[in-house]
């Protein structure tokens, strides 16, 4: 049970990193970044293709991160160009289309064969009889670093100020003479890179199936909603918690089959609770 | 004239419904007949997306999960020999998904757009995971589903699927034209606007999800019956994403759009295969297509429908051009018997607070029966907040009585149904409806075409057969007033109806507003900045400033009051 919980921390930290991608994208462009995990998986799979050609894994991983960043930036270009002031439903539909596109193209690019995804950090250490993978430690460290940097940037820098303005009033921000397109694309680029890091660290332990990895965005959404799509630290904590809960549930025979429903249960509970007061759509 | 064209349409639809299976079964080679079975099935799933997303504006990414529920249920009924046979099972399988549809809709009651996409996607991946844990009933011991005896061949099974599609499409078509379906469109446009029409937003969303889940589950049951068992892969989340894209792209809220989605889902992959390309490129095309449609703002079939409506309207307009214009002099409908002197609206100690800002502070107001009562004051005085609180959109302290009923505990919808109607400062009319459909939705009662046309003409709103999207902003504001009048309200709250109208139109509107109480038997609370309009039609005036009443009384007295002039009216009066 304890080792299941510990390994849950690893996948949970990946959910948390993806949740950070979701929050950053949602805060700045109002788009629920449904393709986040799919973009990260694309980066990871591209890295494995290079690895098959004999490149060292660390170089492949770096190229994969850059590739994912570029894919996400391309999505950012589409959003900045056509959908910045579209209705929420329309922006979300575009996000769905992007996820579908990455899915369909992944069949073409990578086929159905399972991919060999090496771990970036091998081995682990033992604490009180429980094995802790170095990879779990690495992803936790990355998570804490990213969350800290993001909180500082958002609170203390001019870039953070612009991004916060962009969230609420994209057009008004543009009228202040700020090139918002560049900021939007930059933010998406960042989420792509982050998602690739998350997937590179979690995929070796988790699965090598594109679909399974791409839909890790669902527990990530659950985590992001726990932070009200706003609070990075809360979301990070929730992500880790969801990972641990999944790890523990998978060990309990009578309910282990219901593990796939955990993100749904979390999302329903959080939404029904946090939205209980909200009734009307736009302001008057 | 109109009846003849409706008859022509009915006949051509029936002809099409009969011709399609005959053509498919008798002219296509066996390979294509087998392939075609998928078309009506995925057309049904597309239609279910069309109902929830196309019509009601709620994003759903789990339609194939509802289909999986249908497939799983019919398999379970087969294994457990549930009495009734295939056709009963088919309907039961559809019904099995309805509770799940309602469950997914539960968070949709208070949230929309992005967050709802999250719920439905999570539902889809959960079902995916559960399907891999719980095998399809009968698949372990080969208790396969049998096709119904009349439709065992592939050609026969295509005919069965086609019949089910036609029946469901017809039912959805009628539903979309009923007040239920009109409310779906109103919800997609504006939830506040819908509630103000006395239509429950919650029940509109619930019915949309229930119908969507039912239709998708029937399709899923047929999909399982085609091969006798179900492959979890055919219900995977990716399928739900793809059908969402196809349905949005072709506009599956329309029946022809749904049919087209079904055909495209079969034809595009097959054609790709024929020209030597991989068939999974179809989803790439659909994803790109939907982005294009979303950027341009109109689906394939929506474009046709709007064009067809305009053509039909021009033809009808040409036919009636020679007829005399409808008289504007309409006999008064006769005032509803109101208690003679008792006020229609009594507001006592009304208090509204937003955070630390007190927007309304102890407001007292009485509106006499069959009168037009003006509510004026500078910007930020609390006038619109007053309308919002009387119509129930903001929580408030104090009492609000309409015709002797206390509104305090009533919802927005309840107040609208109790005869309190309002208009908004911003346009909230659904562009996809015709004027007549919107008026019928607002009326909430049986209302004759004649009465609607008369009311619209009286206010100067567009003619009933016009599409709201084709009218200008000023006409839509007038249309909102006409809609409120069609509901035969006791109290009508008009929030700056003359804003944005030309001076000439404002004066004409003022004249009409003045006649409303006698003609429609209701009282009016009129918020207006245009003093010529106010003095032309109001008998009594209340002046608000910083959330407090600073003057009230007959129009001439109040407008002459020095405090009022000082607070707000100085320049206006000197001009007048």
Image: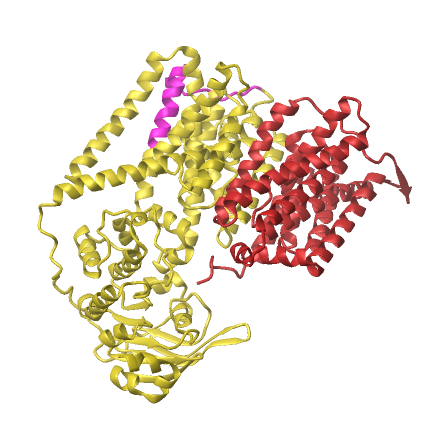
The quarter in which the C terminus of chain A is drawn is bottom left
Q: Residue furthest top?
A: B29
Q: Which residue is drawn at 38% across and 33% down?
A: B257
Residue B572, placed above or below residue B300: below
Residue A202, placed above or below residue B187: above
The quarter in which the N terminus of chain A is drawn is top right
In percent of width and height, residue B359 lies at 47, 75
In the foreground, B205 or B372: B372
Q: Which residue is drawn at 19% across and 52% down?
A: B448
Q: Is residue B122 visible?
A: no
In percent of width and height, residue B441 lies at 30, 52
Colour in which the image shows chain B: yellow
Q: Is residue A271 left or right of residue A14?
A: left
Q: Which residue is drawn at 67% across and 58% down?
A: A158
Q: In this view, does B476 lie to the left or right of A93?
A: left
Task: State which chain is coloured red.
Answer: A
Q: From which residue to which does the magenta span run?
A: B142-168
Q: Main secondary structure of the magenta part?
A: helix
In percent of width and height, residue B570 lies at 34, 82
In the foreground, B567 or B272: B567
In the foreground, A162 or B295: A162
Q: In this view, does B149 lie to the left or right of B64?
A: left
């Amino acid at each position: 049970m304890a080792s299941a919980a510990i390994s849950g921390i690893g996948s949970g930290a990946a959910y948390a990193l993806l949740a950070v991608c979701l929050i950053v994208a949602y805060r700045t462009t109002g788009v629920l970044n449904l393709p986040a995990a799919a973009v990260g998986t694309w980066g990871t799979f591209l890295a494995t293709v290079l690895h098959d050609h004999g490149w060292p894994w660390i170089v492949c991983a770096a190229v994969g991160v850059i590739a994912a960043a570029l894919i996400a930036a391309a999505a950012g270009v589409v959003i900045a160009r056509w959908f910045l002031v579209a209705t929420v439903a329309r922006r979300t539909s575009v996000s769905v289309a992007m996820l579908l596109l990455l899915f369909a193209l992944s069949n073409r690019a990578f086929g159905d064969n399972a991919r060999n995804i090496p771990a970036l950090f091998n081995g682990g250490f033992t604490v009180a009889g429980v094995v802790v993978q170095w990879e779990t430690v690495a992803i936790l460290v990355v998570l804490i670093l990213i969350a800290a940097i993001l909180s500082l940037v958002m609170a203390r820098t001019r870039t953070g100020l612009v991004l916060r303005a962009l969230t609420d009033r994209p057009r008004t921000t543009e009228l202040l003479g700020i090139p918002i397109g560049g900021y939007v694309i930059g933010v998406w680029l960042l989420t792509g890179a982050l998602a690739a890091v998350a997937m590179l660290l979690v995929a070796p332990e988790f699965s090598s199936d594109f679909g399974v990895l791409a839909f890790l965005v669902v527990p990530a959404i659950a985590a992001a909603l726990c932070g009200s799509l706003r609070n990075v630290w809360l979301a990070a904590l929730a992500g880790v918690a969801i990972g641990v809960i999944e790890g523990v549930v998978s060990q309990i025979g009578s309910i282990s089959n219901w593990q796939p429903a955990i993100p749904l249960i979390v999302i329903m509970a959080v939404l029904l609770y946090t939205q209980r007061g909200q009734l009307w759509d736009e302001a008057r | 004239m109109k009846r003849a064209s409706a008859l022509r349409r009915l006949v051509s639809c029936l002809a099409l419904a009969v011709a399609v299976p005959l053509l498919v079964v008798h002219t296509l080679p066996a390979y294509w007949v087998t392939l075609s079975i998928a078309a009506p099935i995925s057309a049904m799933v597309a239609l279910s997306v069309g109902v929830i997303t196309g019509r009601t504006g709620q994003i759903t990414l789990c339609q194939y999960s509802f289909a999986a529920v249908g497939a799983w249920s019919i398999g379970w009924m087969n294994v457990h020999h549930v009495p009734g046979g295939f056709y009963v099972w088919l309907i039961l399988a559809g019904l099995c998904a309805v509770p799940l549809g309602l469950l997914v809709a539960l968070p949709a009651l208070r949230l929309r757009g992005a967050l709802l996409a999250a719920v439905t996607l999570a539902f889809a991946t959960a079902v995916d995971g559960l399907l891999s844990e719980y095998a399809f009933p009968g698949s372990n011991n080969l208790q396969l589903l049998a096709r119904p005896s009349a439709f065992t061949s592939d050609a026969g099974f295509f005919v069965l699927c086609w019949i089910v599609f036609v029946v469901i499409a017809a039912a959805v078509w009628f539903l979309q034209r009923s007040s239920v379906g009109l409310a779906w469109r109103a919800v997609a446009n504006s939830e506040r606007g819908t509630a103000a029409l006395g239509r429950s937003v919650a029940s509109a969303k619930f019915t949309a999800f229930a119908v969507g889940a039912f239709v998708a589950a029937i399709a899923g049951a047929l999909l399982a019956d085609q091969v006798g068992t179900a492959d979890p892969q055919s219900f995977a989340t990716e399928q739900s994403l793809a059908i969402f894209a196809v349905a949005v792209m072709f506009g599956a809220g329309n029946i022809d759009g749904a049919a087209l989605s079904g055909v495209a889902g079969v034809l595009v992959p097959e054609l790709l295969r024929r020209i030597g390309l991989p068939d999974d490129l179809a989803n790439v095309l659909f994803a790109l297509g939907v982005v294009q449609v979303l950027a341009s703002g109109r689906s394939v079939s929506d474009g046709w429908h709007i064009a067809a409506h305009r053509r039909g309207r021009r033809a009808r307009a040409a036919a009636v051009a020679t007829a005399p214009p409808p008289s504007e002099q309409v006999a008064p409908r006769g005032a509803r018997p109101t208690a003679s002197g008792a006020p229609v609206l009594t507001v006592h100690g009304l208090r509204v607070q937003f955070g630390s800002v007190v927007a309304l502070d102890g407001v007292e107001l009485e509106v006499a029966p069959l009168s037009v009562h003006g509510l004026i004051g500078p910007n930020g005085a609390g006038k619109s907040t007053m309308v919002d609180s009387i119509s129930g959109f903001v929580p408030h302290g104090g009492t609000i009585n309409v015709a002797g009923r206390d509104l305090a505990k009533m919802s927005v919808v309840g107040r609208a149904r109790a005869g309190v109607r309002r208009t908004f400062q911003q346009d909230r009319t659904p562009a996809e409806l015709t004027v007549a459909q919107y008026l019928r939705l607002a009326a909430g009662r049986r209302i004759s075409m004649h009465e609607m046309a008369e009311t619209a003409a009286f206010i100067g709103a567009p003619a009933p057969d016009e599409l709201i999207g084709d009218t200008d902003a000023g006409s839509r504001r007038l249309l909102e007033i006409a809609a409120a009048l069609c509901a035969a309200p006791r109290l009508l709250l008009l929030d700056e109806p003359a804003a944005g109208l030309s001076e000439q139109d404002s004066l004409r509107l003022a004249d009409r507003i003045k006649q409303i109480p006698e003609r429609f038997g209701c009282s009016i609370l009129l918020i207006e900045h245009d003093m010529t309009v106010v003095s032309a039609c109001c008998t009594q005036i209340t002046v608000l400033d910083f959330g407090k009443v600073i003057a009230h009384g007959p129009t001439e007295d109040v407008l002459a009051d020095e405090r009022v002039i000082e607070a707000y009216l100085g320049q206006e009066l000197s001009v007048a």
